[in-house]
Image: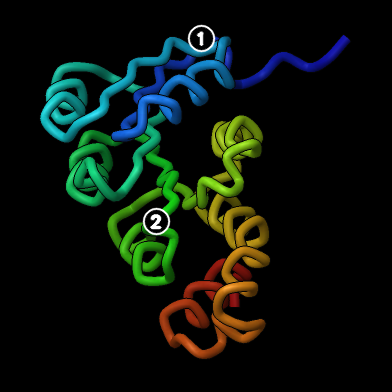
Amino acid sequence: MGEESPLNGKAVLVVDDETDVLDTVEEMLPMCAVQKASDFDTALGLLRHNTYDLVILDIMGVRGFDLLQQAVARGFVTIMLTAHAATTEALRTSIKLGAASFLPKDYMAELKEVLEEILSGKGTRFWWQKSFDRTNEYFTKRLGSDWKEKDAFFKEFEKSLKGN
């Protein structure tokens, strides 16, 4: 018998302007109480009037960084899930604004695993190291194997994750 998921019964808000993404995430998380929003105003209202264990945000089309600031200010663990904005600048901004993880939609099949890792209680350093490990191939294919070394922010951030 398998171990019970830490996602069981969790309240999750998913924000994306693509309804197929909203539906897919909801299908991936049948053990959660999922609320969906497809635009900034709806999402902002939900963030202001509800409590969530996890918030999953797209960036483009829904003003994801503005929503990230609101979610983090309310103390909600927030994950960025994006396609077109899967850039190092978006990754940097997500880190600086307090996201718990950054997942390109190419890795959406791993979302449940990412959320379970985040709920493991191991903390921010663990979450981001796992996020960097998971997405390194994605950014390496697009930017070269030295993408982190070429950018002082990522070089220092990764160093801090390793406790150096």
23 vs 113: above or below: above
Give the residue at mark 1. 9
140 above or below 91? below
Q: Nearer the viewer, residue 63 or 120?
A: 63
Specify the farthest residue to the right: 1
Using the rendered view, name the quadrant where residue 58 is placed: top left
Find the residue positioned furthest to the bottom.
150
Residues at marks 2 and 1, CA–CA distance in whole angstroms:
31 Å
Of the image marks 2 and 1, the number of the one nearer the N terminus: 1
Task: Check disc 2 and report its element: helix, strand or loop.
Answer: loop
The residue under the point 20% across, 28% down is 43
Residue 121 seen in render:
no
Q: Is 104 left, or right, of 16 in this rendering?
A: right
- Left or right: residue 116 compared with residue 4: left
Dividing the image into 4 quarters, which one contains the C terminus? bottom right
The kind of residue tagged 2 is His
User: Whole-percent x and y of residue 10?
Assistant: 47, 16
The circle on residue 84 is 2
- Dot 2, crowdedness within 10 Å: few (<14), some or many (≥20)? few
* The quarter of the displayed image where residue 153 is located: bottom left
Where is residue 134 drawn, in percent x and y? 65, 56
Q: In the rendered structure, which amino acid carries the disc numbered 1?
A: Gly
Left or right position of 137 against 3: left
Q: In which quadrant of the rendered image does the N terminus lie? A: top right
Please provide percent x and percent y for residue 52: 34, 22
* Callout 1 secondary element: loop
The dot on residue 68 is none
Categorize mark 1 by other alpha carbons within 10 Å: few (<14), some (14-19), many (20+).
some
